[in-house]
Amino acid sequence: MDRSNSTSLFKEALNYFPGGVNSPVRAFKSVHGSPLFIKNGSGARIFDEDGNEFLDFCCSWGPMIHGHNHPYIKDSVVRTLENGLSFGTPTVHGNEMGKLMVDNHRYLEKIRFVSSGTEAVMSAIRLARGFTGRSKIIKFEGCYHGHVDSLMVKAGSGLATFGTSSSAGVPESLARETIVLELNDLQAIEDTLTTHGHDIACVIIEPVPANNGLLLQDTSFLAWIRKLCDDFDVLLIFDEVISGYRVGWEGAAGYYSVEPDLLTLGKIIGGGLPVGAFGGKSSIMSHVAPEGPVYQAGTLSANPIALTAGKASLELCMQEHFYEKLQQKTERFVQQIEAHISSRSYPVHLVRMESIFWIAFSGERIITAGQIDPESMEQFKSLHKYLLDNGVYLGPSGYEVGFVSNAHSDNDLSEAADKICKGLDFIYS
Ligand SMILES: *Cc1c(COP(=O)(O)O)cnc(C)c1O
């Protein structure tokens, strides 16, 4: 497969951007070759600058739940564009999207639109601190919440340690405000809240941790966190930037029926354009400026074009049986691969929730970040190369999940599953 145009474009990009990219996950640091420059996409397929075609399971890291260039989303955007791009004033598009979201979600009473998931999380954390008057936060190892300073923190050694920064440029004083715990460890949360509860503003978690493998938690774990947060007057924030509108209309909160105080959204709610949001209980959201003292603002927040794309995307999700059908076809796809894996006894399994899947190079159930064997990433690297050569595009890291879109047909999925099986045969032969 000729990828010379992508290769030379990447070489050029190295002159302009650190590492040649505008987001590190796009670099092919942990897989073979150089990043593909994608020219266009249609439905489940993307096409690179050399004219190669790929079945896409990255889906722009989640937003493209209806596939690429969906005519309804595109036409809506084009119609709105005719009126101008941005005014810095309220528009009817904000109200329409606000109504669609608030009227159809048990746990969203008020929301504020921003322009990225990172911004949503950053603002929700500030709100939690402003509301409680406390400064420390609890997060979990293996959960990603955007590149917010106080969340670029990993666990130190030992239980309930204060974090050390996982990025240069984050002041240690800030990292010390973050306590990092392991997923699935109820005792650690209880102990930490008992010791530090009066200093802790919030617990933030991806209820469906999908940025470091797919580390599915038990409902009881999430329900227990909810209870402990109530006991200690600590706010619970669900970061649903991936899971929101992906695992169902009410996201993971609805899926598990666990109510967060605040939740953050992004990805799907922009339909492919930059939109994020945070929201939750009115009694907390009323602390946001101009109603309250927690300042938060954005020149392009609730941009009419971006919200039009988001609204069109959510309207498509509202169609009858949308999530059910998406879930069922993803299940068939995963089962086809699982059947092959078990017939050959490969030390691999697929983790799936609704239309999110992850290829785990292990026979064991994986529920915490520490259980992932870094050595297993070598297998992913070989699989990624095989699939790229055979027209299937996965995100370029074994820690990333895959997404199935509504544009993936049963035939597309069966073809991709077959290639993944052949890729596994290739690795283990
Ligand atoms: C993608 C993601 C973010 C960050 O969103 P950006 O739009 O990339 O800033 C935050 N939290 C979670 C759970 C995400 O998956």
Image (cartoon, rainbow, N blue to C red):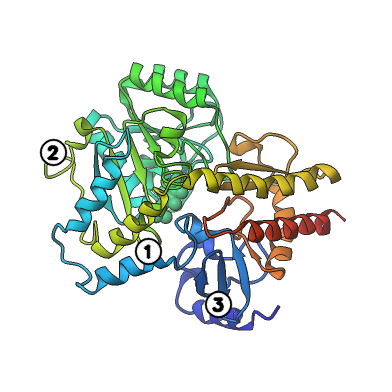
Q: Nearer the viewer, residue 91 or 367?
A: 91
For the residue carrying disc 3, how many other residues have a C-alpha within 10 Å: few (<14), some (14-19), or many (20+)? many
Position in image of residue 296 (x %, y %): 21, 48
**Image marks 3 and 1: residues in contact by CB distance under 8 Å:** no
Judged by depth in the image, the label closer to the viewer, 3 or 1, is 1
Q: Which mark is residue 10?
A: 3
| Quadrant the C terminus occupies | bottom right
Q: Which mark is residue 73?
A: 1
Name the residue rendered at 31%, 57% in the picture: 115
Position in image of residue 186 (x %, y %): 51, 21
Q: CA distance from mark 3 to mark 1?
A: 30 Å
Residue type at mark 1? Ile
The residue that mark 2 highlights is 292
From this view, report whether residue 8 is shown above or below residue 351.
Answer: below
Name the residue rendered at 58%, 52% in the picture: 400
First-in-chain label (3 vs 1):
3
**Is residue 231 rendered to the left or right of residue 95?**
right
| Quadrant the N terminus occupies | bottom right
Q: Nearer the viewer, residue 339 or 25?
A: 339
First-in-chain label (3 vs 2):
3
**Is residue 415 rendered to the left or right of residue 49?**
right
Residue type at mark 3? Phe
Residue type at mark 2? Gly
Q: Nearer the viewer, residue 315 or 112?
A: 315
Can residue 350 be seen from the camera position used here? yes
**Image marks 3 and 2: residues in contact by CB distance under 8 Å:** no
Q: CA distance from mark 2 to mark 1?
A: 35 Å
* Kind of element beneath mark 2: loop
Q: CA distance from mark 3 to mark 2?
A: 47 Å
